[in-house]
Image (tube, grey):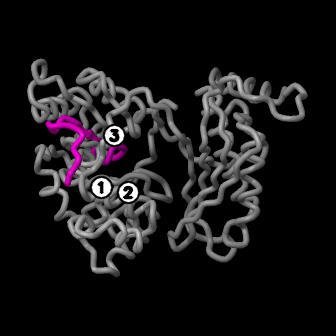
Amino acid sequence: MSIKARSEASILHADLDSFYASVEQRDDPSLRGRPVLVGGGIVTAASYEAKARGVRTPMSERRARLLCPDAVTVRPRMEAYSEASKAVFALFRDTTPVVEGLSIDEAFLDVGGLRRLGGSPEAIGRRLRARIRDEVGLPITVGVATTKFLAKVASAVAKPDGLLVVPAGRELEFLHPLPVERLWGVGPVTAEALHQRGIATVGQIAALTEDDLTDTVGLASGRHLHALALARDPRPVETGRRRRSIGSQRAMGRGPKTHAELERILVGIADRLGKRLRAASRVSRTVVLRLRFDDFARVTRSHTLDAPTMLTETILGAARELLADAMPLIDERGCTLVGLTLTNLLDDDPLQLTLPFEREERGSLDATIDQLRDRFGTAIVTRAVLLGHDQGDPVPLLQD
């Protein structure tokens, strides 16, 4: 039996279409209707014209050009994307005060209770799409449903530049014919395990008992997927919810990488994440290293610190140890992506002191560097190991 979050489909999932590429096509009319690749070496975004030819992200530009020889490549313009995101989120908040941002180009909106002021949720969704098209110049897809999960699935099905409403009471009718890959948490490995059992649709998952499903994909995943297959998602749209983790990554091409090259990339990432922690007045307890190999398989390694920190030096020290431990695997399998994630985040409130009790002064250097970079730009102070090396473009982010 389906457990619905509400009796009316009034949760919107609004997701900008091929965001970076759409901004480029908006700002340069000569790119409209043409396949556009955003990036350099690695495709970070592709227009729908390029996606129709098989281009995906992240993909090497070389491979993308084999699929789409007439594609136009443009360098990312992160400031332009950040400004476009701010304009879109302003329209979200003008629509309803209950907005939960997921990333710079998507959000959940709760429009329950706005019928008298704004009409039906479908009418609100149509008006929102029109305003974003007219006032910001970007296409956006909106899914409308009784739960966050179904609204997100609906927007994915409606892409590009569409609107899809899943009426209350018809959730399973919409959900069950879809492929299992539509469920949150079903990646390539889980999908393969399900396919080996002859399970291809969400309806087939719903027909299993929870015990049967956990035998195939594990206890936690089995419970999660079984609930979603029955449209069980009682989570409300949350405003002001702080991130549970922050991260950054750097994609690279194939080919051998030295320890020094990978460590240099790690240094730049740790610098950025440390600054984000301090700007948000937060501390982290766990450092996670993320790697992608030449065959696109991924692996993570983590280290939990003795005490929460916002010091770049401490974060970088843990990251270096994780990288050193992973180097034999990297030498064997190659590396196309390095990333760091800081988890177990806490607000920087007074914490219980740890031994020894000597006064900690090292954070003053981080604070001084942060102030200089805020005032004069990120290039004003840098580490010697990063001089002369491109650290990639800073990705625009939601507020931490």
Task: Pick the quarter of the image with the N terminus.
Answer: bottom left
Quick one: label 2, few (<14), some, or many (20+) residues within 10 Å?
some
Q: Which label belongs to residue 235?
A: 3
Crowd rating for badge 1 (residues with CA inside 10 Å; few <14, some 14–19, many 20+): many
Amino acid under disc 3: Arg
* Magenta residue check for 7: yes
Residue sitting at 70 percent across and 34 percent down? Answer: 310
Which residue is found at the position 16% from the left and 23% from the top?
A: 114
Q: Which residue is mark 2?
A: 224
The three-letter amino acid code for the residue at tag 1 is Leu
Query: How many neighbours does mark 3 have within 10 angstroms: few (below 14), some (14-19), or many (20 or more)?
Result: few
Location of residue 321 by image quarter: bottom right
Callouts 2 and 1 close, C-beta under 8 Å: yes
Q: Going from the N terminus, do you reach mark 2 or mark 3 first?
A: 2
State the image coordinates of residue 151 (x, y, percent, origin top left). Answer: 24, 45
Q: Quote the CA–CA distance across marks 2 and 1.
A: 6 Å
Q: Secondary structure at mark 1?
A: helix
Report if the CB atoms under discs 2 and 3 are less than 8 Å apart.
no
**Residue at image coords 74%, 45%:** 305
Q: Is residue 171 above or below residue 366?
A: below
Q: CA distance from mark 2 to mark 3?
A: 13 Å
Residue 11 picture location, percent across and down:
23, 36
Magenta stretch, residue numbers: 1-21
> Taking 258 as reference, is 98 above or below it?
above
Of residues 372 and 349, which is closer to you in this image?
349
Q: Which residue is mark 1?
A: 228
| Element type where label 2 sits in the image | helix
Element assignment for label 3: loop
The vertical placement of 102 against 63, above or below, is: above
